[in-house]
Image: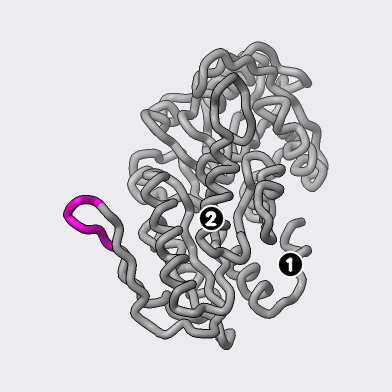
Amino acid sequence: MPEGIKFFTGNAHKGLAQEIAGYLDIPVGDATVTEFSDGEIMVQINENVRGTDVFVLQPTSMPVNRHIMELLLIVDALKRASAHRITAVIPYYGYARQDRKVQPRVPISAKLVADLITAAGINRILTMDLHAAQIQGFFNIPVDNLYASPVLLDYVRTKYYFENLVIVSPDAGGVERARSFAKKLQCSIAIIDKRREVANISQIMNVIGNVENKDTIILDDMVDTGGTTIQAAAALKDKGAKRVVAACTHAVLSDNAVEKVNNSVLEELIVTNTIPLDSKMEQCKKLTVLSIASLIGEAIRRIHEESSISSLFA
């Protein structure tokens, strides 16, 4: 058990918190996070944290605004209780897709959330697969952006022995991710040319690359409504792909995404547990959830010990 470390969590993902605490061999800190009758959140830290190195796990997934507010209040309580250092562990960073102005008179929400988190008194951020890597620059504190690719790679290597494997990027923005993944598996890549007219609604236009009689894995950072992934899978099948699998880090799966996956040509949707998925696992038999607890737990250990975590970014 590391000395001088405390680990707390809000209500966003207690299952993952227990896994990480188990990896670190420390208990989850005693804190009360509840609400008053009018909906205001109330936080109380029920143990001494003076002079300790504190880590707070809180993915800002649905309901996003509530989980962000829980995180801010937990941090403020810890700061006022004289914690030495506070690291926010945010496996899924909400508002990450609003990272720039794409039309007139709109906010840059990812930057605003970064400002709120910093103003609350957080000293360091530990997150995973940011939708846009430049979000790290929105903070004036250290940000460690881990990647789930080692977890996904281990699973793919263990389960799939594809002889004619192709890693597919669902859009031009994900080419670098697909190329890195394909390089480790020593296979080729393909790209989906996608045109998006309205938010959360996409139309697949073309497949760039040879996928005929190939086994394909669509690789993305997240699946939200499922539209992009499902249409990409259908486009690959139309181009003669033999098998279609999808893999992503963040399974948002909003609206009727689970139903779409169940009715799609996808054989399997491989995701990680950056977001809690208990009920959706029961609803979707194609869903495989991999744990990132050991990866985050090891990063927490190394941050606490002031040792290098660069090997975890491989």
Q: Which residue is drawn at 73% across and 24% down?
A: 191
Identify the image quadrant of the N terminus: bottom right
Q: Where are the magenta residues, as a range?
A: 34-39
- Numbered label tally: 2
Residue drawn where x is 60% and y is 42% of the image: 111
Residue pointed to by mark 2: 117
- How would you classify the magenta stretch by its main secondary structure? loop
Specify the farthest residue to the left: 37
Q: Residue at x 54, y 84 (%)?
A: 51
Work out whether 169 lies above or below 251.
above
Three-letter code for the amino acid on which mark 2 is drawn: Ile
Q: Distance between the residues labelled 1 and 2?
A: 23 Å
In the image, 62 versus 77, the foreground residue is: 77
Residue at the spot 53% in from the left edge and 70% down from the top edge:
55
Residue tagged 1: 309
- Dot 1 surroundings within 10 Å: few (below 14), some, or many (20 or more)? some
The mark nearer the N terminus, 1 or 2, is 2
Type of amino acid under label 1: Ile
At mark 2, the secondary structure is helix
Labelled disc at residue 140: none
Q: Position of residue 17 (x, y in %)?
A: 45, 66
Picture colour scheme: one colour
Residue 303 occupies which quadrant of the picture?
bottom right
Q: Is residue 289 visible?
A: yes
Residue 187 position within the rendered picture, expressed as x and y whole percent measured from the top left: 80, 37
| Residue 72, quarter of picture | bottom left
